[in-house]
Amino acid sequence: MSDSFTFAVDEENIRLDQFLVKKLTDVSRSKIQLAIKSGQVLVDGEKLKSSAILKGAENVEGELLVEVQDDIIAEDIPLNILYEDDDLAIINKISGMVVHPGSGNYSGTLVNALVFHFQSLSGLNDSRPGIVHRLDKDTSGVIVIAKNDKSHQHLSRQFAERKVKKVYKAIAWGGVPEEGEIEGLIGRHPANRKVFKMVNNLGRKSLTTFMVEEHLSPLTFVTLHPKTGRTHQIRVHLKSIGHPILADEMYGGGKKMIKSFHVKYTQLLNRLFKNMNRVALHAEKLEVTHPTTGKKMRFQAPIPDDMVNALNLLRNAQ
C-alpha cells in the first residue's frame, strides 16, 4: 500500500532527498530517491531531481510505498483485458476489487490477478508490481499496468506531469450545475486518516472539471475530468460542492440522503439503492502516450451494468 505526505520546507539550502530522509525517518534514502525519480514527489506541484536545492519556502508532497508483505500470491482471478503488448496492459477493473494488497486485503486484489496472468510486470513497487496508478475499490473502469520498469517510469512521469487524460462518469445527488471547475487543496481528515477533505493549507493541489450529461431528478449523471490524481479526489470534490456521489457512504452520499428530498422520490430511491450497492463512479476513458512508440493511445471501458440499470431506472421515472 502507499502513504501520502505533505511537508512545508523549514530549512534552507538542503537537497530534496536529504530533506525527505530527515522527515521520513523509517524510509531508506534509495527508496526516497526512486520515488522522486519516478515522479511520486512534487515540490510546489513540480517534479524535481533528488539533487534539487530547496530554498526554505516550498511545499513538498508525494506518496511512498509501504511494504505489507514479501510474497504476492498469484490467483486465477478473471480479468477483462482491453489491450496488451510487451510494455503495458489496460484492464477494465470491476467494482469491488482492491487494486493492491494492504492491511486486511492480502488476496483477491488486482495485483494477485496480475501476477497470475502476466509473466512480466514492473518491479519498481515491489509489493504492487505493475501498478502505476490506482482506482478505489468501488470504482470500476480503466487502469493501465506497466509490464517492465522502463514503462513504469515513463508512465509514472506522465501521471506526475499531468499528461494523462482521464474521463470519469458519476451519478451525483441533486441538481449539479451544467458545468464547472473544482479546485483546492485535499488533505486527510484529522479524525479519520482514511477519509480526505478540502483543506486550507498543507494539502495537495487538486483540480477537476465537470459537465452534466443528464439531469435525472433527484440525481444528475455527470462527466468529470480530473486534472490531478489525488486519493478520493472526485468523491471529495463532489461532496465539497454539495453533490456527493450516489451510494458513497464515506462522503455523505449514502441512504441518509433520501430524507433530503421530497417524499415522492422515496420509493424510487429505495429501488435505486437495491440496484446500486457501491459508489456510482466509473473510470470510463484513459489516454496515455505509449512508453516505447510515443504514440497517443486511447482506451474506453463501457459503463457497467449496475450503473446503466440505475440510469435507466431514473430515466423511466422522469
Image: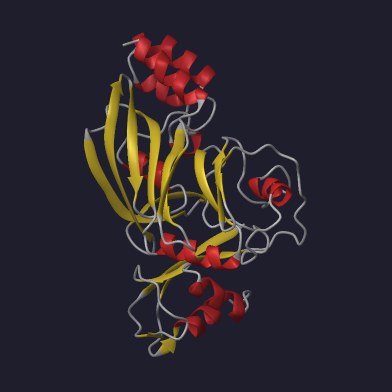
Q: Quadrant of the N terminus?
A: bottom right
Q: Quadrant of the C terminus?
A: top left
Q: Nearer the viewer, residue 248 or 179?
A: 179
Residue drawn at (53%, 17%), measured in percent from left and top?
274
Q: Is residue 122 above or below residue 283?
A: below
Residue drawn at (26%, 36%), measured in percent from left and top?
211
| Quarter holding residue 86 | bottom right
User: Does the image show residue 205?
Assistant: yes
Q: Is residue 179 above or below residue 56?
A: above
Q: In the displayed structure, does residue 109 sit left or right of residue 140?
A: right
Q: Nearer the viewer, residue 50 or 2?
A: 50
Residue drawn at (40%, 78%), measured in percent from left and top?
9
Q: In the displayed structure, does residue 292 sit left or right of residue 318?
A: right
Looking at this view, name the residue that lies furthest to the bottom: 13
| Quarter holding residue 177 | top left
Residue drawn at (58%, 35%), measured in percent from left and top?
94
Looking at this view, name the residue that lies furthest to the front: 293
Position of residue 191 measured from the top left corner of the image (x, y, whole percent): 50, 51
Position of residue 259 measured from the top left corner of the image (x, y, whole percent): 40, 20
Q: Nearer the viewer, residue 212 or 193?
A: 212
Total numbered circles = 0
User: Does the image show residue 6?
Assistant: no
